[in-house]
Image (spheres, rainbow, N blue to C red):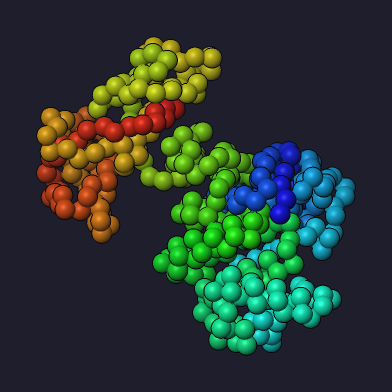
Amino acid sequence: MAELILDSVSQSYAARQIIADLSFTLPEGAIGCLLGPSGCGKTTALRCISGFEPIQTGEIRIGGEVVSRPGWMLPAERRRVGMVFQDYALFPHLNVADNVGFGLRGQPSTARLARVDELLALVGLAGHAGQFPHQLSGGQQQRVALARALAPRPRLILMDEPFSNLDVELRERLSLEVRDILKREATTALIVTHDQYEAFALADWVGVMHEGRIQQWDTPYNLYHEPANRFVADFVGQGTLLTGEVVNDHQVEIELGVLDGHIPVECDASGCDECVRNCHVDVLLRPDDIVHDDDSLLLAEVENKAFRGAEFLYTLKLPSGQRALSLVPSHHNHAIGEKIGIKLAVDHVVAFRRE
């Protein structure tokens, strides 16, 4: 395992810049994720780290060793980086044990077999050593691919959209299983995905990417509750923006009441160091920031609802006509058009300058 550092890395194809000034540090033994929509540059970043693509600016270091800089790159086979591809890339003519042991050729047979047995037990496939890839389910093939990448004890594991070929339920279960496997092996890993639930289930650190740049590199919790800008707020989780006005440097007033918290600098159009009274902002409210309360005098009309089993996601129309979302336990089954009592339960104030 090793620390991964990208320092102001850029890469272009012809005149088109794919990643720009990409910088982040993934601590040793941590699991990181590059999260973003298709075309944002996350897979290109992975290819640069693995040694498949050169870089135009900056530097990539793995375990303190420079592996890429402008005009030079350490060959991919010398980086001690394991790759898990989107399509698993298993060898169809080799059985499970031989697939896992492929990267251990040249080692004594006793040590090789012991490592293969150890990994098959780790990924829950101890009884499948003699089977071939076509005899396995998609989830089993994914675990074989992970075991094969882990076999030579790489400094870093890279995974490119590892669960995109699987159904939603299997993806969620495998995300937790893969995290547990990586942690038990104490392996540093970087995953790319467009699925935020995957990213949150797997990663200790997540970088939200947009147009080749990291918008925010942070913990999943902070990305959801303290997004750095509108793109992150919109891409991560659900929410609505309500108009508000800054009262002072720690309070903002919206239609539903006064919120206490840190008011970010961006709320002031002039870019001054502190927000000022009467500065107009848009305040992000998540569905869990608005709580259903039958005793509340503050009412909102149920305009739409989506049943999610344990909860309803209500779209609420406020007295001003603005709309907000609220997660409500499903035994509170209110009709569309009905008015219900609500109250605020906001722990993090997220405000953006009014556009």
Residue 248, position in %: x, y? 39, 13
89 relative to 53, above or below: below
Residue 159, position in %: x, y? 63, 61
Q: Is residue 134 visible?
A: no
Write the residue at 74% across / 56% down.
Answer: 155
Q: Is residue 147 visible?
A: yes
Residue 241, position in %: x, y? 36, 34
**Left-right relation of 67 to 96:** right
Q: Quadrant of the C terminus?
A: top left
**Left-right relation of 319 to 201:** left
271 relative to 337, above or below: above
Write the residue at 67% across / 42% down.
Answer: 25
Residue 317's quadrant in the figure? Answer: top left
Write the residue at 78% across / 40% down.
Answer: 58
Residue 87's quadrant in the figure? Answer: bottom right
Write the residue at 35% across / 14% down.
Answer: 247
**Left-right relation of 263 to 14:** left
State the count of labels.
0
**Left-right relation of 245 to 70:** left
Q: Nearer the viewer, residue 271 or 190?
A: 190
Residue 198, position in %: x, y? 49, 56
